[in-house]
Amino acid sequence: PRNVSIMGPDPTQDSSIVRKHAVLLLSSLVLQDYIKWRGLLVHRFLAACVDDDIEVSHLAETTLCGPLLSKQPNLFFNNFVEAIFVLNDCTAHKIYAAAQANGESGSGIAVNFEGICLSKKQRMRIYRIMLSHMSDEEKIGITARLAKEVLAGALESDSDLRWAIESPPQSETPARGAGMEEDKRREKALNVMSDCFAVLTSPSARVGRSTGTNDADDVEDAAVTNGPSTAQLSAVRGRLLSKISRKHMIDNVIPTLCRMKTILEKSRSPLLKALMNFFVVIYKMNKNEVRELLASDPGLLQEVEYDIKIFERRGGGGVIPQSASTDEDEAHTAE
């Protein structure tokens, strides 16, 4: 439908008034169950949240994060990893294909993502919007999926993301058209990996950051209730989830990063800086646990610690402390 095709940050195609009406109309149809989240419709809405027209972007964000998210609370969680592939137009990957095929067997419309081209700054803005409306449990789930399906997935020999971490074969000389297509495919895979590292390094994805709950209400509840207060229980729960998150990082992410680091160094990949930045964040927050994990391989531990020191000494870290503000996060990830 035309109302879907005009949603996105491209003011050259339609006027801002038309795009605002499209957002309102489609939002109303979704809320009334006249249409479902078929195909890449949710990603079209996300793209509208970073429209070049501030009124369009504000309306799209308010609608998506308000009534639409209230109607389907898991909307962002269920589509976050897929969004990284869709927003980068990484069409060759199976995750993109699965997202595009969503709802094809049912009635309704299937929506593509043609005509949308987002900058790194716009994509990071979308990721922050989604993460800011997720619970700590959902953030842990997102981190686990990114580690398994993106980072570990890139190490699989038949993965499309493998193109992003290895140097192209020097012996092959494809035809001009095929070569250009492979370069585009590799660039999209690189962007997916880069966004993944940026999200994992971002304070917005860390467990324990506020997701919009009212701490003042918790304090007020604590003053009028007996036994453990809501604030105290929330703090205990937060510490528990933080431990779960850290354990996952140590047990699952660190081994993957060590394997990928070797490949990126060999291929002299531009992703090495992003990987090391993420490594520094994990190491500083979990120094003892990382040392314990790598204790069985003293050579690797020494190499990792040395590389981290050199990386920081050269000013390549750009590490954001956990107390950093959202504005600092945006400045760090913007192009």
Image: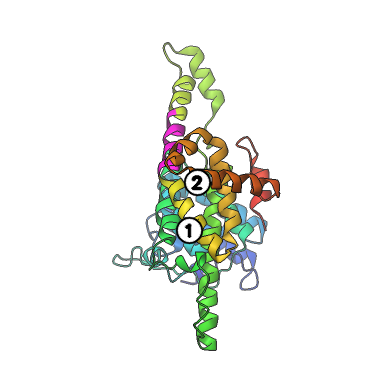
Q: Nearer the viewer, mark 1 or mark 2?
A: 2
Secondary structure character of the magenta stretch overall: helix
- Name the residue furthest left: 105
Whether residue 66 is visible here, answered yes or no, is no
Q: CA distance from mark 1 to mark 2?
A: 38 Å
Place of residue 107 in the rendered image (x, y in percent of width and height, measured from the top left): 31, 66
Q: Nearer the viewer, residue 44 or 174?
A: 174
Q: Quadrant of the C terminus?
A: bottom right
The residue shown at (50%, 67%) is: 166
Total count of labels: 2
Q: Which is more N-terminal, label 2 or label 1?
A: 1
- Name the residue furthest bottom: 175
Q: Which mark is residue 104?
A: none
**Image height of 113 relative to 69, above or below:** below
SS under mark 2: helix
Place of residue 42 in the rendered image (x, y in percent of width and height, measured from the top left): 46, 58
User: Which range of residues does the magenta coloring cover?
Assistant: 240-251
Q: Nearer the viewer, residue 31 or 233?
A: 233
Tell me, yes or no, whether the two marked residues, 1 and 2, touch with CB atoms within 8 Å: no
Q: Nearer the viewer, residue 150 or 257?
A: 257
> Was residue 243 drawn as part of the magenta stretch in this picture?
yes
- Name the residue furthest top: 226
In the rendered image, which residue does mark 2 sit on?
Answer: 299
Question: What amino acid does circle 1 point to?
Answer: Ala
The residue shown at (53%, 24%) is: 217
Question: What amino acid does circle 2 point to?
Answer: Gly
> Was residue 87 drawn as part of the magenta stretch in this picture?
no
Q: Is residue 296 left or right of residue 179?
A: left
Whether residue 294 is visible here, answered yes or no, is yes
Place of residue 193 in the rendered image (x, y in percent of width and height, measured from the top left): 52, 59
In the rendered image, which residue does mark 1 sit on?
Answer: 83
